[in-house]
Amino acid sequence: MKNFCFALCIGLSIYVNQAFGSETGMPQLNPEFWIAQIFWLILIFSSLYLIIWKIFLPRITYIIENRKSRVVNDLGEAQKLKDNAEKKLEEYNEIIEKTKKEAKKIIDDSKKKLDKDIENKKQKFNVEIEKELMATEKEIKDLKKTSTSSIADIAAETSAEIIRQIINTEINKSNVSAIVNDISKREIEKHI
């Protein structure tokens, strides 16, 4: 390449004098210089053609092919990444759906279990309340029975004592007790 450029420079310097030496007008239009012009035209365009063909064109072709292969590889890699991302998204959505179903099942099971526990405790509580009510009613009945007899006894004793103090004589307690029991029974029957 250097030799070619050197030869080109020498050839130009030789014919420059002839090119500038024309005084009759433009040397391009002078037929005596046409052979030299054709020679230089062929030489310059041939060298430019060879330089472009051997040096620049392979580099450009290499760069274009390299870019094309890089673009194809990048597109293939992008497609793989896209497919991988879509798979991951599907897996993620499946995991979310599965987790939602499991959470709903756990919530439903917990709710059923809680409702069952509440119902069992409610039944136990109702049973205990029934037992307490029955025990309380029994106590009240027993208390009524014992209190009426106790009240009658106390009333009989108190009445006998009051009558004894008022009239200053001993009274038969069985008579007073019979009267108090009779009055007590009538009064209890009114309230029951």
Image (cartoon, grey):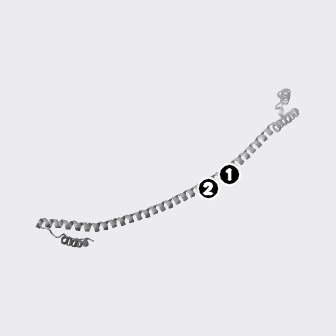
- In the figure, is residue 68 to the left or right of 167? right
Q: Which circle marks residue 50 in the picture?
A: none
Q: Nearer the viewer, residue 66 or 87?
A: 87
Residue drawn at the location 43% of the way across and 63% of the way down: 124
Q: If you read the primary sequence from the N terminus, does the residue marked by circle 1 or circle 2 appear first?
A: 1
Gap between marks 1 and 2 measured at Cα: 16 Å
Front: mark 1 or 2: 2
Instruction: Give the crowd class for mark 2: few <14, some 14-19, many >=20 residues within 10 Å.
Output: few
Q: Position of residue 35 (x, y in %)?
A: 88, 34
Residue wearing tag 2: 94
Instruction: Give the crowd class for mark 1: few <14, some 14-19, many >=20 residues within 10 Å.
Output: few
Under mark 2, the amino acid is: Glu
Residue drawn at the location 25% of the way across and 66% of the way down: 150
Split into 4 quadrants, where in the image is the N terminus?
Answer: top right
Q: Nearer the viewer, residue 140 or 125?
A: 140
Split into 4 quadrants, where in the image is the C terminus?
Answer: bottom left
Q: Nearer the viewer, residue 127 or 98?
A: 127
Q: Give the quarter of the image for residue 148.
A: bottom left
- In the figure, is residue 12 to the left or right of 177? right
Residue drawn at the location 23% of the way across and 66% of the way down: 151
Under mark 1, the amino acid is: Asp
As displayed, is residue 32 above or below residue 111?
A: above
Q: Nearer the viewer, residue 9 or 21?
A: 9
Residue wearing tag 1: 83
- In the figure, is residue 1 to the left or right of 97? right
